[in-house]
Image: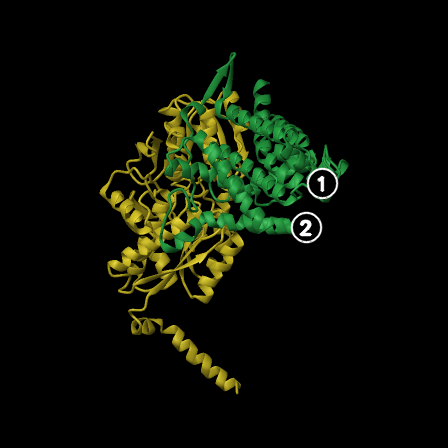
């Protein structure tokens, strides 16, 4: 039984890790960010590149990835997303285009392939990320055996969630963000620099995706297409939880992760995935705004 | 004006031209012979398939450097299948009909091969297919240079039971035809060896969440895992396996698809001690193989490029084609296919021979154990190449062939 709960918790934490950034960019800012998966992918590649070129340790890659993807996010916001606020479907199309551009940029090594130049760690192939030996194998605590790496992911997810909650609910920047979520025009009228806060919020959401990427790189395969499937799971969690609600995102990732684990252990992973989708459809049918939702924007 | 007489004249003239290809051939003797290379250059499968296209091009350039085929150089026309079976079939038509090419090296997945097969059969063209696959096919228009289940599993399962002393198999694979057919053959062999299988489980292609499956392996009481998992799922599988505290010393993963590429991507420490059965390993220590690896690295301009079974097969199949064309003495597709039956070639991994009955390939089954350096150590090697039996899952044996030069014997398949 302990195994089932732990696996469920682990699946939940992975869902939450991806969804947390989306909960901010989609949930709070109303941007359907299809490039979120590519932010995760960039984070994973930062882990690959920083170990090849800087000799950096896996743990050190986490802050580097946060900064790099946050900068990417900032640039995307400044160049594209900024012009599209309030045009939901246009953001979907534009960010989807960005996601394809990023994938191809990594695959073609930013175009250097055409000049016969190869950069280690980029290109179309599968990349290897070295995980420190203390994160491989199991750790036992109080007679129970834990999967070390998954316990680490749960820990990182908890820390990031706590950090996000703290920023949103205990800092003055957070108050501004929440004000913009509720009503951007009113917030602007109160003297909040909406453009600046939006840009920083988008960068923060992207940075969270970058950290998710580093965590994924330790147990999944790093390759240019890796983000495409993750963004689907991310949206699923955010929509179920309720757009704009951090708490709803946390709860729905917990719910979907545990359902997935329970059904998968009883039957198999293929049926489990179908059941999870059925639950999501059910939630959307009966509570179109998700389990928790704000009104506004 | 096209009246009946003119029409008859033109068709008569055309048929004269068409029945004298030998004259035209001689007149343009130094024109290149064009062959196709149909592999995905874009999309999810391009990572692997581009390498296969490279291997075909490298073989062609080596043949050209040594004087070509029938005194003519080879020109490889590369088409992009875009990781999509429908595109594969369109591009195959375009190569055969528009470019008038008779010989195509290509396809990686069974899905793409099945999609192009009718075109090759209708147009009297030949496909060279290099990937190890599930068997159950007997086309007279395809030369299969990769291993099939009886060559991968026939000696592997008995060896696992007898030498490793394992009795309980957990069979796991990706959810499509190859792993399911492999499981079918495996179960027969497991039961024949006096062992048992406790589970036969599948995950979707590309699935990378292994927590539950590895937990099931742990709880099942199995003492060996037979893995037919393909693609990027492999990496997540081996990592999860170690992270949940399982060890290849007690419960080894015995795989049929895990290659040098995946080992390099997951990190050798996760696979060290596990096994793999395939005819070719990069670690085969012969001068021919060292030359092959060096040449491939030079050709692709990647000093760390790895070589593996399908890549080797993609390379040597071009030489088998060359020998067949030279034996036939001309470029007639049927003549080439008749001539290739029984052709042998000393490939980087040892001698290979195209079977006279079923156009599959005789090769030497090997079992490798992955080492800490990411390379394999060959722990068992068949003394001689093994005859391919594409219908072994359905009872085909060397004395009772289902697939012969005449085609598939449907009666035997049903009985």
The yellow chain is B
- What x and y, as percent, mark residue A43? 49, 38
Residue A260 lies in quadrant: top right
Q: Please tell me which residue is depicted at 69% across the width and 48% down the height of the picture.
A: A86
Per the image, the residue denoted by label 2 is: A87
- What x and y, as percent, mark residue B333? 38, 61
Q: Is residue A101 left or right of residue A24?
A: left
Q: Is residue A290 left or right of residue B73?
A: right
Q: Residues within 10 Å of mark 2 (few under 14, many from 20)?
A: few
| Colour of chain A in the rendered structure image | green
Give the farthest residue toward the right. Answer: A286
Q: Please tell me which residue is depicted at 63% across the width and 45% down the height of the picture.
A: A195
Is residue A33 at all visible to an observer of this figure? yes
Residue B16 lies in quadrant: bottom left
- Chain label for disc 1: A
- The answer to which of marks 1 and 2 sits earlier in the sequence is 2
Per the image, the residue denoted by label 1 is: A190
User: Share a chain, discs 1 and 2?
Assistant: yes
Give the farthest residue toward the front. Answer: A191
- The residue nearer to you, when weighing B380 against A14, is A14
Q: CA distance from mark 1 to mark 2?
A: 24 Å
Q: At numbered mark 1, what does the secondary structure look like: helix, strand or loop?
A: loop
Residue B375: give its label: none
Q: At numbered mark 2, what does the secondary structure look like: helix, strand or loop?
A: loop
Give the farthest residue toward the top. Answer: A142
- The residue nearer to you, when weighing A66 against A139, is A66
- What x and y, as percent, mark residue B228? 46, 35
């Amino acid at each position: 039984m302990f195994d089932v709960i732990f696996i469920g918790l682990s699946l939940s934490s992975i869902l939450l890790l991806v969804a947390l950034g989306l909960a901010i960019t989609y949930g709070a800012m109303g941007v359907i960010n299809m490039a979120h998966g590519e932010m995760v992918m960039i984070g994973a590649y930062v882990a690959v590149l920083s170990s090849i070129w800087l000799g950096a340790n896996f743990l050190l890659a986490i802050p580097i990835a946060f900064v790099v993807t946050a900068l990417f996010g900032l640039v995307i916001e400044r160049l594209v997303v900024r012009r599209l606020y309030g045009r939901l479907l246009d953001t979907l199309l534009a960010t989807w285009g960005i996601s394809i551009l990023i994938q191809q940029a990594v695959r073609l090594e930013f175009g250097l392939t055409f000049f016969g130049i190869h950069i280690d760690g980029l290109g179309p192939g599968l990349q290897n990320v070295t995980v420190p030996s203390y994160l491989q194998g199991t750790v036992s605590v109080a007679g129970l055996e834990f999967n070390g790496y998954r316990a680490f992911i749960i820990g990182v997810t908890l820390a990031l969630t706590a950090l996000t909650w703290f920023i949103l609910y205990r800092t003055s920047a957070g108050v501004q963000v929440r004000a913009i979520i509720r009503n951007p025009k009113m917030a602007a009228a109160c003297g909040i620099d909406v453009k600046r806060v939006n840009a920083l919020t988008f960068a923060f959401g992207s940075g969270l995706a970058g950290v998710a990427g580093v965590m994924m790189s330790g147990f999944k395969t790093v390759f240019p297409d890796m983000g495409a499937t993750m963004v689907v799971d991310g949206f699923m969690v955010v929509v179920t939880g309720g757009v704009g609600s951090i708490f709803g995102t946390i709860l729905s990732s917990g719910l979907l992760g545990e359902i997935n684990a329970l059904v998968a252990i009883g039957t198999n992973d293929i049926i489990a995935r179908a059941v999870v989708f059925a639950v999501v459809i059910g939630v959307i049918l009966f509570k179109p705004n998700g389990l928790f939702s704000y009104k506004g924007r | 004006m096209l009246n009946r007489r003119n029409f008859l004249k033109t068709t008569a003239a055309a048929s004269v031209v068409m029945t004298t290809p030998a004259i035209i051939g001689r007149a343009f003797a130094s024109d290149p012979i064009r062959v196709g290379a149909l592999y995905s250059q874009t999309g999810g499968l391009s990572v692997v398939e581009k390498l296969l296209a490279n291997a075909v091009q490298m073989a062609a350039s080596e043949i050209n450097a040594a004087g070509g085929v029938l005194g003519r150089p080879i020109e490889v026309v590369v088409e992009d299948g875009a990781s999509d079976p429908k595109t594969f079939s369109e591009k195959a038509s375009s190569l055969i009909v528009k470019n008038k090419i008779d010989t195509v090296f290509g396809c990686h997945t069974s899905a793409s091969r099945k999609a192009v097969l009718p075109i090759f059969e209708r147009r009297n063209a030949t496909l060279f297919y290099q990937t190890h696959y599930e068997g159950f096919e007997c086309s007279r228009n395809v030369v299969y240079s990769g291993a099939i289940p009886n060559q991968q599993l026939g000696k592997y399962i008995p060896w696992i039971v007898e030498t490793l002393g394992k009795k309980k198999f957990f069979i796991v694979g990706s959810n499509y035809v190859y792993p399911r057919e492999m499981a079918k053959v495996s179960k027969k062999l497991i039961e024949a060896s006096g062992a048992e299988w406790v589970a036969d489980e599948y995950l979707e292609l590309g699935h990378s969440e292994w927590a539950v499956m590895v937990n099931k392996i742990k709880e099942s009481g199995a003492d060996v895992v037979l893995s037919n998992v393909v693609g990027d799922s492999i990496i997540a599988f081996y990592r999860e396996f170690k992270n949940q505290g399982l060890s290849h010393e007690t419960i080894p993963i015995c795989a049929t698809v895990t290659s040098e590429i995946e080992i390099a991507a997951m990190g050798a420490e996760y696979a060290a001690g596990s096994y793999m059965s395939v005819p070719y390993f990069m670690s085969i220590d012969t001068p021919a193989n060292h030359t092959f690896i060096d040449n491939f690295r030079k050709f692709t301009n990647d000093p760390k490029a790895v070589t593996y079974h399908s890549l080797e097969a993609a390379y040597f199949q071009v030489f088998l084609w060359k020998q067949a064309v030279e034996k036939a003495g001309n470029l007639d597709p049927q003549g080439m296919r008749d001539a290739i039956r029984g052709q042998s070639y000393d490939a980087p991994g040892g001698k290979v021979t195209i079977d006279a009955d079923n156009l599959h390939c005789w090769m030497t089954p090997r079992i490798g154990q992955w080492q800490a350096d990411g390379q394999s150590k060959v722990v068992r090697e068949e003394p001689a190449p093994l005859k391919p039996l594409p219908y072994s899952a359905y009872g085909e044996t060397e004395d009772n062939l289902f697939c012969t030069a005449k085609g598939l014997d449907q009666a035997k398949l049903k009985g």
